[in-house]
Amino acid sequence: MGLARSLRRQQRGPRLNPADYATAESLIETSKTVEVYEREFLSKLKDDELARDVEYTIVPPDKRTMPLGELMHHSLNHGVHHRGQVALLLRVLGYAPGNFDILLYYAERRGVSA
């Protein structure tokens, strides 16, 4: 919820506790909650707000500023990076994660072949 929270100009919450996400179900439920926040934020976002500077912190107390649009671009790119990491870890553990390319996802949602 970090990005969605910061985009609404709220303070970042406490660090996530891995013990709170011991099951796939707990991850799925949290993901659904985050998606609701993201959809609400995006539904109210105006084009001119993409240039608005947003202050953020990677390593406290250093504060940085970046336009909202660039932060959103970073967030998408960062998610793709982690998807690749998870796929690699699954393979290392002997699992085949299958093809989860975004093109296949969209095609499946529409009921067509990619």
Image (spheres, rainbow, N blue to C red):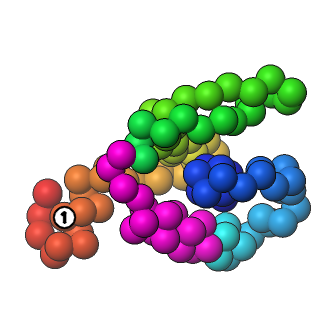
Q: Which residue is mark 1?
A: 107
* Element carrying mark 1: helix
- Image quadrant occupied by the C terminus: bottom left
- Crowd class of label 1 (few under 14; some 14 to 19; many from 20; radius 10 Å): few
Majority secondary structure of the magenta segment? Answer: helix
- Image quadrant occupied by the N terminus: bottom right
Q: Which residues are magenta?
A: 32-48
The residue lying at 75 percent from left, 27 percent from top is 63
Q: Amino acid at mark 1?
A: Ala
x and y percent of residue 4 in the render? 59, 56
Whether the magenta-drawn stretch holds residue 38 is answered as: yes
x and y percent of residue 7 in the render? 58, 51
The mark total stands at: 1
> Image check: 111 left or right of 18?
left
**Which image quadrant is residue 20 in?**
bottom right
Q: Is residue 42 visible?
A: yes
Q: Which of the two residues, 20 or 13, is positioned nearer the viewer here?
A: 13
> Image check: 83 left or right of 13?
left
